[in-house]
Image: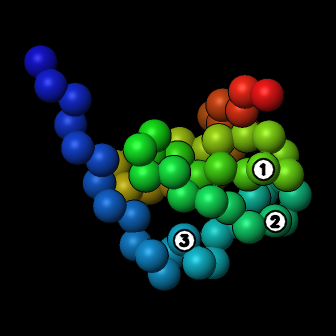
Amino acid sequence: MTTPEPVAVDPRLLEILVCPLTRTTLRYDRARNELISAAAGLAFPIRDGIPIMLAEEARPLED
């Protein structure tokens, strides 16, 4: 069974999204299909092309 390809995120959407906790810019990690908030130390998942901007859904970044 193969892993489905991530759905592309609209670049215009990426330009306006900010971290919901710190209001800082996010970095798009294409390999992991996540939006990274370095300030909050969290990675927000993208599912079916939709960023899930909930802190409880985010994954803590490794040190």
First reached walking from the N terminus: tag 3 or tag 1:
3
Characterize the local packing of mark 1: few (<14), some (14-19) or many (20 or more) Cα atoms within 10 angstroms: some
Tell me, yes or no, if residue 52 can be seen here: no
Q: Quadrant of residue 9?
A: bottom left
Q: CA distance from mark 3 to mark 1?
A: 15 Å
Q: In front here: 56 or 26?
A: 26
Q: Residue at x 87, y 58 (%)?
A: 22
What amino acid does circle 2 point to? Thr
Q: At label 3, which amino acid type do we have? A: Leu
- Report the residue at 85% width, 52% height from top: 39
Q: Amino acid at mark 1?
A: Ala
C-alpha distance separating marks 2 and 3: 12 Å
Q: Of circles 2 and 1, which is in front? A: 1
Asked if the residue under mark 1 is in contact with the one under mark 2, i.e. CB atoms within 8 Å, the reply is yes
Decide if residue 26 is on the left or right side of residue 7: right
Say which quadrant the N terminus sits in.
top left
Instruction: Tell me: residue 27, above or below residue 42.
Output: below
**Residue at 83% from the left image edge and 65% from the top image edge:** 23
**Residue closest to the far top:** 1
Vertically, is 18 above or below 37? below
Q: How many marks?
A: 3
Residue holding disc 3: 14
Q: Residue at 62% across / 60% down in the picture?
A: 27
Circle 1 is placed at which residue position? 38
- Whether residue 33 is situated above or below residue 7 in the rendered picture: above
Tell me: residue 17, above or below residue 43. below
**Render colour scheme:** rainbow
Query: What's the mark number on residue 24?
Result: 2
